[in-house]
Image: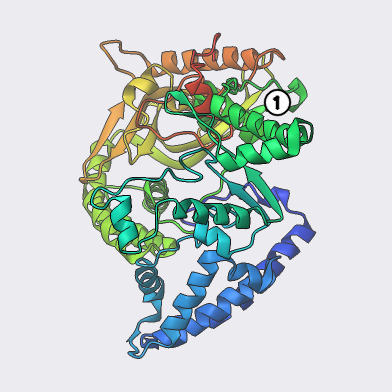
Amino acid sequence: SALGDSRPPFWLSRLSARGLDEARDMLARLAEALAPLTAFRGEQDADHAALTRASVVALENLGRAADGGLTQLYAGDAGEKLAELMRGLVAASVPFAFAAAEWPDVMDALIAPEMVKPAQGTDRNIAIWGALEARLQSVDTLVIGGLNEGVWPRKPESDRFMSRLMKTGIDLEPPERRIGLAAHDFQMAMGAKEVVLTRSARSGDAPAVPSRWLQRMLTFIGKEHAAAPLRRGEALLAWARALDAGERQDFAPRPQPRPPLGVRPQHFSVTEIETLRRDPYAVYARRILGLMPLDPVIRDPGAAERGTLFHAILHMFSARIADPRQPDALAGLLEAGRACFAEAALPPDIEAVWWPRFEKLAANIIEWEHGRADAVAQRYAEERAEKTVVGRTGVTLSGYADRIDLLAGGMADILDYKTGSSPSKAQAHTLLSPQLALEGALLRRGAFKALGTAEPSQLAFVRLKPNGDVFEESILEYNRKPRTANELAEEAWARLEKLLFHYADPTTGYLSRALPFREGEADGDYDHLARVLEWSAGGDSEDEAGEA
């Protein structure tokens, strides 16, 4: 396709014929479950009540396919709120219609003001009640808290406005009556199936006095019979003290797995070498454990997709237009852009931003092509480098070059299109990002079969800026230290050989974040698996010893 390449997706090799059949069956059942909603696709005047009914049917179809069935769909506070909302939408007295494609946004707006509050606090299995509430309800286990004198029962307080004698004269209840009511509440609470009596050992800075009722109970049953419930209480106290003590657990160590040599990768692409240097653990997770990051099912295209799209356009342009000096070169580039945009089928709001940006780029791309066309004998786009053994390691390297221009003198320029700022020129020159330099080394070794054995003349990024600017940025000159393409390529090759020997040692592990990216750059796909936040909080952030 215009946007992809001929390489099969990583998951294809993992699916057997049976697995593919099961995947098709799942997709068929998913399409069947969502059929009530998809039937509205393209409708411009859909009624909200009809869409709500279709959504309910689709949700219930999906619910029936799940293990919990419909009971799980409408379970809990969130399920009850969902059912209430759907009933209200169907029964709304004022119907309104809109394009069916807007239903997700309309539903988002309708759900936004709704709040799901747990009916019984943070945990549906636990409730905190006052004395009257506890008296009126039955539970399996009741915890009576604060059995201290002054709390159970409350200390009688003098009225600031009326004395005891004045209250007696107008038949108001004396303060002591509240002690009797509290005793009644305590007696009712003791009738629960299982009761836990608790009190505070201290009140402020002073020892607390047990409630008179608690003291009388302990006196009545005697020390011998009180020992068993006290032991059960001590077990609970031990758990509580362990939680309060917050015993410090050792942080997870910085992962550095050392798999057997037999399962370590024996082939790399040029794009993986930077990862092998920066975050070897990511290579371990992807290549040895076989864990591949999955994109969210629903997300807007981002910078990665924009880069892929623009690469595809330039690849198609280079394949169709042999000489960018032709009068119709700009029209050919725009036509390639329209074809790739059509295949990408971007959301309208994304295309409305990306297409004008590409149109601004197109004229500058042709101008840049004109500037180098006289020296170029032939252009090669998305040229593949065949597997090549790296020195004496036995490990092979291959890759794709965005663009190789064979010059009239027999040498070649290797160009890499970049729609962002990474990697920087400094990272490429110092071989922290060695992709371009390694492509130069592969070129010298004849890995690009279409070009034969050639010497690299220039290694450069072609920056496609958001404002429409296009400029070529050589990585051979940095910090007043010019290098030739051959020198940089051979140094990258030698370093790679040394790095591969480093990982041919069974004692060498795949360290997490050996050379971390700069602050603000994207985190790794496997940082959560490596528990980076935990081991870095523990202070284990030293750089890896050795070459990596």
Is residue 42 visible in this depiction of the protein? no
Image coordinates for residue 406, horizontal then vertical, percent: 41, 33
Which residue occupies the foreground of this view, 395 or 291?
291
Q: Amino acid at mark 1?
A: Arg
Which residue occupies the foreground of this view, 213 or 356?
213
- Residue at image position (36%, 39%) is 417
- Residue at image position (21%, 52%) is 360
- Residue at image position (26%, 53%) is 162
How many marks the image carries: the answer is 1
Q: How is the structure coloured here? A: rainbow
Image position of 476 (left or right of 366) = right
Q: Which residue is the site of mark 1?
A: 264
Image coordinates for residue 427, horizontal then vertical, percent: 37, 22
Relative height, residue 489 to residue 79 (above, below): above
- Residue at image position (73%, 36%) is 232
Q: Secondary structure at mark 1?
A: loop
Q: Local crowd at mark 1 within 10 Å, few (<14), some, or many (≥20)?
A: some
Quarter holding the C terminus is top right
Image coordinates for residue 279, horizontal then vertical, percent: 53, 25
Is residue 188 visible in this depiction of the protein? yes
Image coordinates for residue 456, horizontal then vertical, percent: 42, 24
Image position of 295 (left or right of 9) = left
Which residue occupies the foreground of this view, 95 or 313?
95
